[in-house]
Image (tube, rainbow, N blue to C red):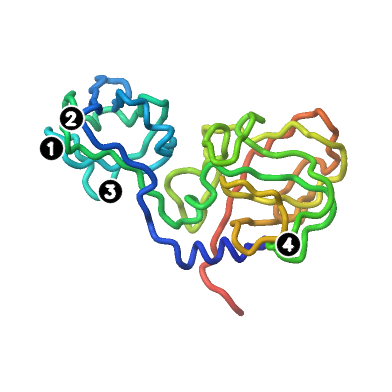
């Protein structure tokens, strides 16, 4: 059974969208790259330090060319480097230097997808704890990241992403990512914990967002070919979906 932490339920029920990062000023440049993804550059190399991340919604206001402003719906960021972000082709209407009052910002909302953006999945031995708020039990067998890459809490590198647009009450893993882990211990996988991007030492918490679920070869929340994990081997998750039910109760 999937179990939601108190921290997650509080976020879903009460979180409002907030501006996560912004850059203002003439150091911005809008670049129309023709058939390739368009880009915005920052001479101050501030995109990463201002918490811009791939998949974020980008909002632009105050550009001299009206078509370079995004409007209320925003645009999805494709890639982020310190001095450059890319967005889809043709979203920059015309190349220009940013005016002093140009604002480029990203916002983060309270959706389930946003809460777990750039998070990880931790695989444990033992049985699933009674509550998702409880401290982890058993042995940590591995941490699922993008292509088993190194993960640092608070940074977006190798954190897991869900598809941009939910469908039929579901969010699912990004089709462009490989979700895998290199086992750090041997044991029988018993349950997983989906964690957000913030540091989570897996102690008891009513604040941190988590979803826990069982692991098994059948009849479990996460179905695997084998539950026998061997240290040093790499294991891949091909499909991962979270569905919110249409109704509760009998």
In which quadrant of the rendered view does residue 233 lie? top right
Of the residues under marks 3 and 2, which one precedes in the sequence?
Answer: 3
What label does residue 134 carry, if any?
4
Label disc, if present, on residue 78 of the rendered structure = none
Looking at the image, is mark 2 or mark 4 earlier in the sequence?
2
In space, the residues marked 2 and 4 are separated at their CA atoms by: 51 Å
State the separation of the CA atoms marked 1 and 2.
Answer: 8 Å
Q: CA distance from mark 3 to mark 2?
A: 16 Å
Query: Which of the two labelled residues, at mark 4 and mark 3, occupies the earlier sequence position?
Result: 3
Callout 1–callout 2 Cβ contact below 8 Å:
yes
Judging depth in this view, the residue of 153 and 170 nearest the camera is 153
Residue at 76% in and 52% down: 191
Q: Which residue is mark 1?
A: 66
> Which residue appears at 22% of the width and 30% of the height?
92
Residue 46 in the image: x percent, y percent?
37, 30
Q: Spatial distance from mark 1 to mark 3, Cα to Cα?
A: 15 Å
The image quadrant that residue 47 belongs to is top left
Q: Residues within 10 Å of mark 2 (few under 14, many from 20)?
A: some
- Disc number at residue 93? 2
Residue at the spot of label 3: 73
| Lateral position of residue 16 relative to residue 43, left or right | right
Q: Tell me if mark 1 has few (under 14), some (14-19) or many (20+) residues whose alpha carbon lies within 10 angstroms of its own.
A: some
In front: mark 2 or mark 4? 4
* 126 displayed left or right of 15: right
The answer to whether the residue labelled 3 contacts the one labelled 2, judged by CB atoms less than 8 Å apart, is no
Question: Which numbered disc flags the more N-terminal residue, 1 or 3?
Answer: 1
Residue at (62, 46) in percent of width and height:
199
């Amino acid at each position: 059974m999937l179990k939601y932490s108190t921290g997650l339920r509080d976020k879903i029920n009460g979180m409002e969208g907030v501006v996560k990062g912004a850059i203002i000023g003439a150091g911005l440049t809008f670049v129309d790259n023709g058939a390739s993804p368009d880009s915005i550059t920052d001479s101050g190399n501030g995109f990463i330090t201002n918490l811009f991340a791939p998949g974020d919604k980008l909002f632009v206001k105050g550009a001299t060319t009206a078509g370079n402003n995004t409007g209320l719906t925003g645009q999805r960021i494709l890639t982020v480097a310190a001095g450059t972000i890319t967005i889809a082709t043709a979203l920059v209407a015309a190349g220009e230097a940013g005016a002093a009052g140009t604002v480029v910002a990203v916002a983060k909302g309270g959706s389930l997808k946003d809460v777990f953006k750039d998070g990880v999945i931790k695989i444990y031995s033992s049985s699933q704890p009674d509550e998702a708020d409880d401290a982890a039990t058993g042995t940590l067998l591995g941490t699922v990241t993008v292509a088993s890459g190194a993960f640092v809490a608070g940074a977006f590198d190798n954190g897991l992403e869900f598809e941009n647009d939910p469908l039929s009450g579901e969010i699912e893993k990004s089709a462009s990512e490989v979700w895998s882990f290199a086992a750090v211990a041997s044991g029988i996988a018993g349950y997983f914990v989906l964690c957000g991007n913030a540091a989570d030492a897996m102690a008891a918490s009513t604040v941190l967002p988590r979803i826990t679920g069982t692991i098994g070869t059948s009849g479990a929340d996460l179905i695997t070919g084998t539950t026998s994990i061997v240290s040093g081997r790499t294991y891949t998750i091909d499909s991962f979906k979270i569905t919110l039910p249409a109704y509760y109760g009998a």
